[in-house]
Image (cartoon, grey):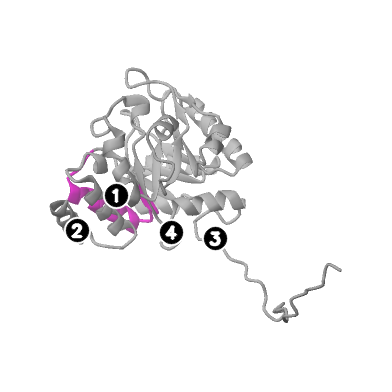
Amino acid sequence: MADQDESGAPREFHADVPQATEGFFLKGAAHQDWGIKNRLASIFDPRTGRTVMLAFDHGYFQGPTTGLERIDLSIVPLIPFADTLMLTRGVLRSVIPPTAGAAIVLRASGGPSILKELSDERLALDVEDAVRLNAAALAVQVFVGGAHETQSIHNLTRLVDLGQRFGIPVLAVTAVGKEMVRDAKYLRLATRICAELGAHYVKTYYVAEGFDTVTSCCPVPIVIAGGKKLPELDALRMAHDAVRSGALGVDMGRNIFQSEAPAAMLQAVRAVVHGGETPERAHELFRSLAAAR
């Protein structure tokens, strides 16, 4: 009979102990499927609920960006210090070791180069290829207010449909064109639209005035873009202030790989995001690690 147990040992059914129903730690994801939650938990550290993403997908429209001429030399040594890598599938297959432990966020949109109108993007990979590559999430650029706004929003909604089908979260990246004002009012609009249309988390820029209103009215997590290269202490202050205002992490590129000591800078950013360090103490860590390299 199926209920027989030849070991003779008493079995413990613990009938008096209710089964625990664990909630999910990440904002806005409680009702997602198991696969999406599992992938999000590889991006956002469940211990802190935050993430440090290393972005080096710039080449998909800029070509060999300064600091990314040789990704095997500049980026691969940084992988142990990042929770997540944001990159293209071409670089993933050609350069990144399969033994890398960081979660993979694949750039899923593209089209024009810096020589053309950047907002005219299309989806640039098949979701089945993302599954082959074990992607933790797919990133799509969304140009709210741009010349090709509707097309970019259709890219987002199409990718969300595919992501839900295959259990892969979608990161909406809000692009701010030269003609758009980068302020809290615009960021509230752009991030909320992305969330309303199904993005599982959103990447946007940090602004000092009113950023807490951006994070509070967006029903999914927000991570901030690093933006242009800043002095190290200024970049650490930006990360600190963004997290204090409700961001659940950072996605930094140029402020890491264009730093004078990229590995030290990435560790300092981790100290701010995951460790709760002040920018000043994190900068001291940066200097000490940079001096010891």
Q: Residue at x 53, y 44 (%)?
A: 169
- The residue labelled by disc 4 is 49
> Which amino acid, by three-letter code, is at mark 4?
Gly
- The residue labelled by disc 1 is 209
CA distance separating discs 1 and 4: 24 Å
Q: Residue furthest right?
A: 1
CA distance separating discs 2 and 1: 28 Å
> Which amino acid, by three-letter code, is at mark 1?
Glu
- Which tag, 2 or 4, sits closer to the chain's start? 4
| Residue 164 image-quadrant placement | top right
Q: Position of residue 45 (x, y in %)?
A: 43, 57
**Image quarter hosting the N terminus:** bottom right
CA distance separating discs 1 and 3: 31 Å
- The residue labelled by disc 2 is 285
Q: Residue at x 27, y 37 (%)?
A: 73
- Tag 4–tag 3 contact (CB < 8 Å): no
- Which tag, 1 or 3, sits closer to the chain's start? 3
Q: Nearer the viewer, residue 73 or 191?
A: 73
Q: Which mark is residue 24?
A: 3
> Which is closer to the viewer, label 2 or label 1?
2
- Which residues are the magenta region? 229-250
Q: Nearer the viewer, residue 118 or 289?
A: 289
- Which tag, 1 or 4, sits closer to the chain's start? 4
Q: Position of residue 231 (x, y in %)?
A: 17, 45
Q: Residues within 10 Å of mark 1 (few under 14, many from 20)?
A: few
> Which amino acid, by three-letter code, is at mark 2?
Leu
> Which is closer to the viewer, label 2 or label 4?
2
Q: In the image, is residue 214 part of the stretch drawn in magenta?
A: no
